[in-house]
Image (cartoon, rainbow, N blue to C red):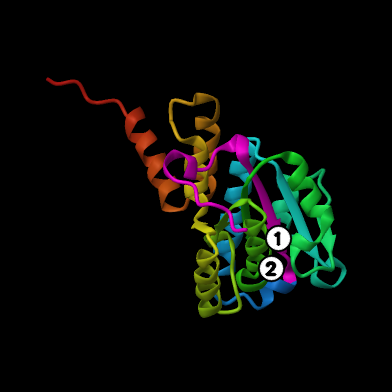
Amino acid sequence: MSNIQKKGLDALLRPEDSILVLIDHQPFQFTNLNSHDPAVIINNVTGLSKAAKVFKVPTILTTVIEERGGLIIKQLQELFPDQKPINRTFINTWQDPAVTDIVAASGRKQLIIAGLWTEVCVAMPAIQAVAEGYDVFVVTDACGAVSKEAHDMAIRRMVQHGITPINWMAVASEWQRDWARTETAGQLASVMFENGGASGVALAWELQLLATPVPAEK
């Protein structure tokens, strides 16, 4: 039975209910990534992962046949130096108990997925997990496909199954929810400086202006 779509505040992400699964950000997948600039995907999945660390959201790294497809990108491995990515043979991550057992044991039902490629290694587990009662979010700007059409059609397909598309900065913003939460606000600002693109530049500029003395009136 498909998961019932949440409404109102219940539909928004909460750090204590979230778990992040990053799938197959590996060299082989990047070689035929044509829906996005690879540099953008690397930046976005890195920003997403940093935000997960800020909010203490459990993060699972997984690869497919890494001995041939390559090791997970260094940006992710360096963020989780003590975690060995779960190396699968299943194309569909959700058929591998090594992954699903961890998710189930967490008790968390807001499942956030990003990976390569959108139409295969993201769509398969997302569609299966939502039918098992998880509230599934796919971070579309940290995913990519073999073509723009493949990416777009995959997102449309997943939406039909009740999966929510979202971008990484929206994920981080929903986790933060209130800038008065000072225990995470400063750390999230640092993530935005490094990976937030123009938003990070604008934030740095705003802080510069706030710190600039106003000349005294003569």
Q: Quadrant of the C terminus?
A: top left
| Place of residue 208 in the rendered image (x, y in percent of width and height, measured from the top left) | 37, 35
Amino acid at the residue labelled 1 = Ile
The residue depicted at 51 percent of the width and 57 percent of the height is 164
| Residue closest to the eye, 124 or 22 | 124
Label 2 Cα crowd, 10 Å radius (few <14 / some 14-19 / many 20+): many
Q: Which corner quadrant of the image does residue 74 belong to?
A: bottom right
Amino acid at the residue labelled 2 = Cys
| Residue closest to the eye, 141 or 130 | 130
| Residue closest to the eye, 118 or 35 | 118
| Place of residue 167 in the rendered image (x, y in percent of width and height, measured from the top left) | 50, 55
The residue stretch that appears in magenta: 1-27
Rounded to the nearest angstrom, the CA distance separating label 1 from label 2 is 7 Å
The vertical placement of 183 against 111, above or below, is above
Label 1 Cα crowd, 10 Å radius (few <14 / some 14-19 / many 20+): many
Q: Is residue 41 magenta?
A: no
| Place of residue 72 in the rendered image (x, y in percent of width and height, measured from the top left) | 76, 60
Query: Label 1: which residue?
Result: 23
Q: How many marks?
A: 2
Label whose residue precedes the other's in the sequence (1 or 2):
1
Q: Which labelled disc corresponds to residue 121?
A: 2
